[in-house]
Amino acid sequence: MTGRRTIARVVLLTNPAAAGHAEPAARRAAARLRALGIAVDARAGDSAADSLALARAAVHGDGPGACDALVVVGGDGMINLGLQAVAGTAVPLGVVPAGTGNDHARAHGLPRNAPEAAADVIAAGHTRTVDLGRITAADGTTRWFGSVLASGFDSLVSDRTNRLRRPRGRLRYHLAIAVEFANLRPLPFRITLADGTEIDRDLTLAAVGNTSSYGGGMLICPDADPADGLLDVTLVDAMPRLRVARFFPTLLKGTHVHHPEVTTHRTPALRLSSPGITAYADGEFMGRLPVEVTAVPAALHLLAPAP
């Protein structure tokens, strides 16, 4: 569903502690929005928790402090933070992509590496109503995500990356991949779909997609549609290392779904469980399995290019 909003005032949120080009992109986007006659309240949190508090204050404020849109500047992690504030509300989310992966931007056709163009999209006020995924942990806490939830080999790599202190930057991620590949083992998963189907077998990974890609364009759930009220599930069976090494490049084109080791499902909800395995979504840590994952239709109003 699409619509149109009048955008007169935005809260523009950045996380100065995040790596990348967020601060320069924020300055350029803010200048462009102001040139277009939009009032910009620029805010920056000292931490993720502080940024989330600022986002929620912007969304749930009223009176003179109310905003027409929450605008986040950064990568998929910053967008995920914004989702926690706007999901299920009438306040639209604007995005100035300034990350390394930018999978949300890919999914919705948002301008990448072009802060002024992203600001133009926000100012135009065209909204797209899309689904979000909702994750419910064993303790009842919930989190929202917009792109892909990863568990298995992918989440083990993320765990390892977060534990490493050296090297810095992308080299740390590549080292984590190498270490986890050397430690590759079958992971026992139990998955229950909304229709009662139970899947109980060893996997390399399980991915749940609201949109098609993660990791900067890897099409893990190539047919996922963020407006169909369903989640796409991609399961990769446990394989020997050599076969896994040959398999992963196919993710870039989405052709992995044709391999016999891959099964796909489409469901409005599912339960994921695997001993000792964590889940990440939008590149952010979501917690340990088991988790319940649900598609929530029309949970987000996104400022996007005109249809």
Image (cartoon, rainbow, N blue to C red):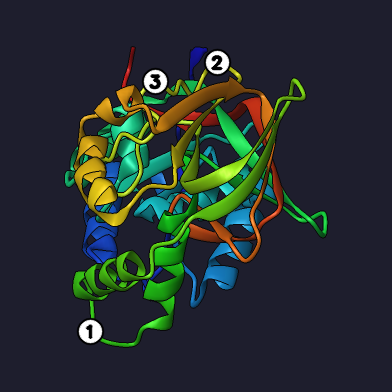
Q: Is residue 250 left or right of residue 210?
A: left
Between the residue at mark 3 and the residue at mark 1, the CA separation in whole angstroms equals 36 Å
Q: Residue at x 23, y 68 (%)?
A: 174
Does 129 sit above or below residue 192? above
Say which of 111 and 245 sits in front: 245
Q: Which residue, as the protein is rendered here, is positioned at the far bottom?
A: 165
Local secondary structure at mark 1: loop
- Disc 2 designates what residue? 228
Which residue carries the number 3 mark? 223
Residue shown at the point (25%, 26%) measured from the top left = 255
Q: Is there any visible trace of residue 128 in the rendered image? A: yes
Q: What residue appears at the point 50 percent right and 46 percent down from the top-left corner?
A: 203
Q: Nearer the viewer, residue 90 or 174?
A: 174
First in sequence, mark 3 or 1: give its number: 1
Q: Gap between marks 2 and 1, in whole Å?
A: 41 Å
Mark 3 in CB contact with mark 1 (< 8 angstroms)? no
